[in-house]
Amino acid sequence: MALNRRLPALAIVMACLVSTAAPSSSPILQSQFIYDSAPYPQAHASTLAETQAGTIVAAWFGGTRERDPDVTIYAARRIKDVWQAPVKVADGVQPDGTRLPTWNPVLFQPPKGPLILFYKVGPNPREWWGMVTTSTDDGRTWSRPRRLSDGIFGPIKNKPVALQDGSWLSPSSMEEGDAKTARWSLHFERSVDGGKSWTRSAPVASPEGLQAIQPSILFHKDGSLEAIARTRQGALAVTWSKDQGKSWSPLAAIDLPNPNSGTDAVTLADGRQLLVYNHSAHSRERPGKGLRYPLNVALSNDGVRWHNVLTLESKALPSGYAYPAVIQARDGRVHISYTYNRVRIRHVVLAPDALPPLPVDQR
């Protein structure tokens, strides 16, 4: 499979043509679409990473509609603040010629080694399996994808993390049952050999009945880990680990709403925790579903008391703003990408020092 085929030139408008400048007083340094048009009508589930060379790379899936067999993984590189033309990097074509949709790419740049792209293939989230491909040339080209071991799904939506002992911890989850009998659960997958093999944790207990998926992992100064996840119950959920991700506390709700939509979070270099999420709850008319707008940034020092400090998007759109990804680059700037009304992927650069301060008693 050719992994570096470019989209038609006329389908791509360079990001500089759609970039919008933000006032100098704003923490938003840049806001732009990664592409303006493409040969597919829908896009979703973006992911970001900074490569060893300092290049920001994004990936997402695009196709007719989510779940359709033509849904394919695309990626783009950002060179000198300009997004290059996206390329197709993986599809769901099977050995017998049949085709299945691809899902939820996740980029991961470990401290050493190639850039890694995880993704899923399968007819739906209950039957999909994990795939992985790598790039040794700064995201320009990609290796032949390989399937992960049975029962290992890879990171479901959000990036893995590298731990102090050199192991990788991947935030994962499962969806079982149909819409009426859905059973969601979190688990974590660990590799001690640079991704060659993985072991899987037990599901995180949920005595309060929270059904959660798609966790993000945060680091705390006392050595503990925190994972924040999406739920079907109208609020975000949290679980904690004091043994570097080997075991996790029972799920509990935190005081932030969630309209059954993906989030992402990152621990900043200064120790603050930053979360990107939809600050809206699920709808009474549509239990378990809600409005995916506005899109917000929250900060916390302790991972318990969160403060909504910035609204990235507030205009009502039919499909809203969803599935954010967030990283902090080596230069300190925060990069966020997210689905824009299911038709494009938007990229935002923040100056974290310009975000509103936390209350005095929580700094």
Image (cartoon, rainbow, N blue to C red):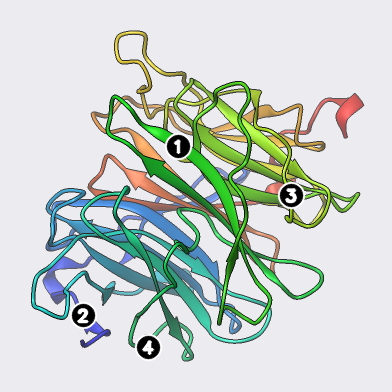
Q: Nearer the viewer, mark 2 or mark 4?
A: 4
Residue depicted at 40% across the width and 28% down the height: 293
Specify few, some or many for label 2: CA neighbours under 10 Å numbering under 14, 14-19, or 20 or more. Answer: few
Is 224 positioned to the left or the right of 143 in the image? right
Q: CA distance from mark 1 to mark 3?
A: 18 Å
| Residue 255 seen by the camera | yes
Q: Is residue 62 above or below residue 350?
A: below
The answer to which image quadrant residue 85 occupies is: bottom left
| Residue where numbered disc 3 is placed | 247
Specify few, some or many for label 4: CA neighbours under 10 Å numbering under 14, 14-19, or 20 or more. Answer: some
Q: CA distance from mark 3 to mark 2?
A: 44 Å
Q: Nearer the viewer, mark 4 or mark 1?
A: 1
Q: Position of residue 120 (x, y in %)?
A: 34, 62
Is 178 positioned to the left or the right of 360 in the image? left
N-terminal of the pair, mark 4 or mark 3, is 4
Three-letter residue code for mark 4:
Ser
N-terminal of the pair, mark 3 or mark 2, is 2
| Residue where numbered disc 2 is placed | 6
N-terminal of the pair, mark 4 or mark 1, is 4
| Residue where numbered disc 4 is placed | 143
N-terminal of the pair, mark 2 or mark 4, is 2
Three-letter residue code for mark 1:
Trp
Q: Position of residue 208 (x, y in %)?
A: 61, 21
Is 241 positioned to the left or the right of 73 in the image? right
Q: CA distance from mark 2 to mark 4?
A: 16 Å
